[in-house]
Image (cartoon, rainbow, N blue to C red):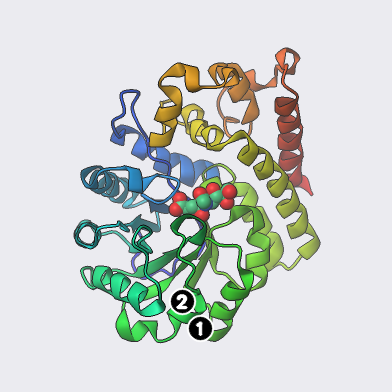
């Protein structure tokens, strides 16, 4: 990890590896790190967040995952950010102390989402009590109102925040309110705080208002593609950046329609191991909850040819495809791939 380096660029939101019997699978994290660095050129990770379903894990599991990511990321990753948010303040504080003790490069916290803060002061008070348990660790507010239901504007939250949380370093902004985001950046400057966007399918819009980077699930497997968009935007070649965004958007639209299961099964092929988020286990067991197409490994394999490019070439057998959705997916994949040569 690189202490002091500003958090920017792409941050992959880690999936939680699970064993078939529902235990967290720490043994594949080293492979996961190597895959991200080598195949996706992504050197930042966000652990125990939404994608990793940190809130569905026990405190002990969250700590074990954090430890393993920090250990395996030591000389390979720039940043290992641990989400330590919880409904219980003492648990969140415990996780923050733990993240500090193991040498995490940052911690992030969502707003409590059951008994919700009703105003900025209540929210800041909660965040402050967590951040102060890790006084040497950069702190990020994780704003995700579609899931927390806490809609306190970040612009308002940031007003005077450093006085109350000296370690405050930035915001992971997982919302579509670009007006709020733009005003945050306009008033605070992206030099002072890091603004990381969390709605992958519309990252280009957030780049236009000045974010420093992005945290998201899709950078696990579209990291390289998205970096091409970042490069085009920085050049600046807006038309090219738009082409990438449109194609990535189409691709994601399709993945989203298929459901999270598809995204979470991808690493099964990448890492050649079972890598299921907790929610996926609910879908897998009992088996009859699972739509028939998920049983067919071959179909799945074909849907992510880019991700397994270095692996087998089994992906090309379109003749056996019956589902029109899968065919369209493959066509989109092809388009996204051909984007490299735009
Ligand atoms: C609601 C949700 O899961 N949002 C994702 C996005 O990356 C999302 O998967 C993507 O934009 C596709 O919709 C991230 O913002 C979540 C995230 O970074 C995390 O795992 O903490």
Residue holding disc 2: 193
For this view, does 2 lie left or right of residue 147?
Answer: left
Q: Dot 1, how many residues are within 10 Å of its Cα: few (below 14), some (14-19), or many (20+)?
A: some
Against 203, residue 134 (above or below) is below
Q: Quadrant of the N terminus?
A: bottom left
> Is residue 43 shown to the viewer in this render?
no
Q: Which mark is residue 80?
A: none
Residue holding disc 1: 188
Position in image of residue 163 (x %, y %):
33, 86
At mark 1, the secondary structure is: helix
For this view, does 321 lie left or right of residue 19?
Answer: right
Contact (Cβ within 8 Å) of mark 2 with mark 1: yes
The quadrant in which residue 4 appears is bottom left
Against 167, residue 64 (above or below) is above
> Is residue 45 shown to the viewer in this render?
yes
Against 94, residue 314 (above or below) is above
Q: Earlier in the sequence, mark 2 or mark 1?
A: 1
The quadrant in which residue 199 appears is bottom right
Residue at figure coordinates x 49%, y 35% from the top left? 264
Residue at figure coordinates x 60%, y 54% from the top left? 200
Position in image of residue 103 (x %, y %):
25, 59
Count of numbered circles on the image: 2
């Amino acid at each position: 990890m690189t202490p002091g380096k500003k958090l920017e660029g792409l941050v992959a939101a880690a999936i939680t590896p699970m064993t078939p019997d529902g235990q967290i699978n720490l043994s594949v994290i080293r492979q996961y790190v190597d895959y991200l660095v080598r195949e996706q050129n992504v050197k930042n990770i966000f652990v125990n967040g939404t994608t990793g379903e940190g809130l569905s894990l026990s405190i002990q599991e969250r700590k074990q995952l954090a430890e393993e990511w920090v250990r395996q990321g030591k000389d390979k990753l720039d940043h290992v950010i641990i989400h330590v948010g919880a409904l219980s303040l003492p648990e969140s504080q415990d996780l923050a102390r733990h993240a500090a003790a193991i040498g995490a490069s940052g911690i992030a916290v969502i707003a409590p989402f059951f008994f919700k803060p009703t105003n900025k002061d209540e929210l800041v008070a909660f965040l402050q009590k967590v951040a102060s348990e890790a006084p040497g660790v950069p702190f990020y507010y994780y704003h995700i109102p579609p899931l927390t239901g806490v809609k306190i504007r970040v612009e308002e939250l940031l007003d005077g925040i450093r006085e109350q949380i000296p370690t405050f370093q930035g915001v992971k902004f997982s919302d579509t309110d670009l007006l709020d985001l733009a005003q945050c950046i306009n008033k605070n400057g992206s030099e002072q705080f890091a603004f990381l966007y969390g709605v992958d399918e519309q990252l280009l819009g957030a780049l236009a208002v000045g974010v420093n980077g992005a945290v998201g699930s899709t950078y696990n497997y579209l990291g390289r593609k998205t970096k091409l968009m970042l490069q085009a935007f920085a050049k600046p070649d807006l038309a090219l950046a738009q082409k990438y965004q449109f194609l990535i958007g189409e691709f994601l639209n399709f993945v989203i329609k298929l459901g999270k299961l598809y995204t979470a099964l991808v690493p099964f092929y990448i890492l050649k191991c079972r890598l299921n988020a907790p929610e996926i286990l609910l879908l897998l067991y009992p088996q009859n909850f699972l739509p028939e197409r998920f049983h067919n490994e071959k179909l799945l394999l074909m849907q992510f040819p880019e991700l397994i490019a270095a692996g087998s070439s089994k992906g090309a057998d379109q003749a056996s495809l019956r589902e029109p959705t899968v065919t369209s997916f493959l066509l989109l994949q092809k388009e996204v791939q051909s984007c490299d040569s735009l």
